[in-house]
Amino acid sequence: MVTINQSIVLIALPDVFRGIHLNPLDPGNTGYLLWMMMGFMVVTAVLVVMFGRLGDMFGRVRMYNLGFAVFSLCSIMLSLTWMDGDAGAMWLIGWRVVQGVGGALLFANSTAILTDAFPVRQRGTALGINSIAAIAGSFLGLVIGGVLAPVDWKAIFLVSVPFGVFGTVWAYVKLKDNGVRRRARMDWWGNATFAVGLIALLVGITYGIQPYGTGVMGWGNPWVIAALGGGVLLLALFAWIETRVDEPLFRLSLFRNRAFLAGNIASLLTALGRGGLQFMLIIWLQGIWLPLHGYSFEETPLWAGIYMIPLTVGFLLSAPVSGWLSDRFGPRMFTVGGALVTAASFYALMTLPTDFGYGVFALLILINGLGSGLFSSPNRAEIMNSVPAESRGVGAGMTATFQNSSMVLSIGVFFSLMIAGLSQSLPHTMHDELVAQGVPAAQAEGLAQLPPIAVLFAAFLGYNPFRQLLGGVLDRLPDGGAHLTSKEFFPHLIAGPFHQGLVIAFWFAVAACVVAALSSLLTDRVGRGHRAAAHESLGSELAAVAGEAGLAGNELVIPDEEFDAQRAAPDTTKP
């Protein structure tokens, strides 16, 4: 439900802005557009680790159920939007931010609940099924949004309500909290420095990709520099605080575990590549390939989601299988292999021409999905198996923080790389092509100076920008501007510059996945983390039995063979 909601908004943004009567390509509305996309992600990234800690303290199921309720309420409020213009945009952004609170409650505790519920040898399979739901939702949302938004843009929010209400009731009735609950004092200074520092960092990234002054991006903006620098300093202060409080928000001691540290680094890097891929493919399909193949700009959002289905299919095929196999053979071969397969697919995608044959494109994104699925489930199981039972909530929250932050970071990285590539050749290309079509040189020069991000947003949203940008000039052209506003002119205009930026962005994705594979090689010896996690669960039960028998305080050591036999034997001591 949550990940469908994230991507359904991305694909429905043109209809949302038309519904509230705002032009998303107007420079003054760029901030609304970015915060509509990223507000949810920023809030989720900031709060998820705190909610994981609260789950450890007060019960993971309780926090999870609250997440369902908050998310459902916000979906209803979003669908009740009645205002237009700036007020309507602020209403939507505000409730999307609150909805991120519900998303954080769900993300922070779902992995920990599954880890508590399943024995060690089934966790890879269980977490693989959970990963299927999350990743598949992010791509299914593209199709659902493309179908619903043209009918009624408010339906993209209402679609979550029945599932949210059912999930709230069902989880309250059926879901039992069998985790280790640990009462502790809240780390308020850690919470404050972490939240403000991460918000400053993510906000700085958000505004860094927007134009500033005469620059195509805002990385030189003093406010952006202050936000990034201040965010880094606050996060450094947060790390210092965490080493000096009795009950830290971030258990930095978990990073002493090589499996936890290396697994999270690998997860962060692959999430960076995967997050950027979704945006690049949407721009590629909506802005270039689909119009060149006869689709109108208005219908490209729906068809972009449909043509990206092989990516989802690849993930759906490999994630459960790799989770099941990693339970039996260990995770390392799957995490390393999956990251390398994903890197190879990125490299192959950058060799395609912008007007590709769909069969080859479908095969490559299928392989990309297979690689992501191979990596995802074993990586998550490896991380969670390395975390002590009483810290699973905060461990899951830390992992979710890295992944959700990587989505915002990937937007900053990929858009920056793409804008850098476009700015090298797009202005000259646009000027020459417009003059060749009869546009006066002065107006052609003005349009050529448009920030590249406006062109990217136009492609991302499925807009034909020249119909709006040229206005009355079209009537004075020999053909009435028919060629400039055709399905072919805009795609041909941006194809070359776009491909230059695409190659730069995909090289970054290749490098990120290769480093992720190397990081996965650095995890502990296969099976070590599994056995340690399993001992914790059984040890807590044996400690209780020993206490009742007057044996408390004595160390109880069980040989591995006896431990496995006890784990497999039927439990005859409980009714």
Image (cartoon, helix red, strand yellow):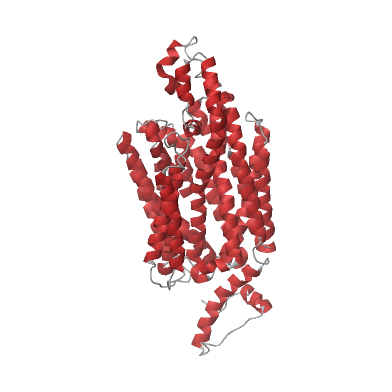
Relative to 511, is 148 above or below? above
**Seen in the image, is 575 located left or right of residue 30?**
right
Residue drawn where x is 63% and y is 77% of the image? 566
Does the image show residue 490?
no
Q: x and y percent of residue 313 in the render?
A: 61, 44
Q: x and y percent of residue 141 in the render?
A: 50, 42
Q: x and y percent of residue 68 in the render?
A: 41, 54
Q: x and y percent of residue 370 in the render?
A: 65, 47
- Which quadrant of the figure has residue 156? top left
Relative to 166, is 9 above or below? above
- Which quadrant of the figure has residue 429? top right
Does the image show residue 411?
yes
Report the front residue among 432 and 350: 432
Relative to 218, is 556 above or below? below
**Seen in the image, is 385 located left or right of residue 518?**
left
Report the front residue among 476 and 485: 476
Report the front residue among 286 and 521: 521
Relative to 112, is 156 above or below? above
Counting labels gives: 0
- Which quadrant of the figure has residue 307? top right
Residue drawn where x is 54% and y is 64% of the image? 115
**Seen in the image, is 12 located left or right of residue 428?**
left
Residue closest to the far top:
478
Residue drawn where x is 50% and y is 90% of the image? 550
Report the front residue among 213 and 154: 213
Residue drawn where x is 44% and y is 15% of the image? 474
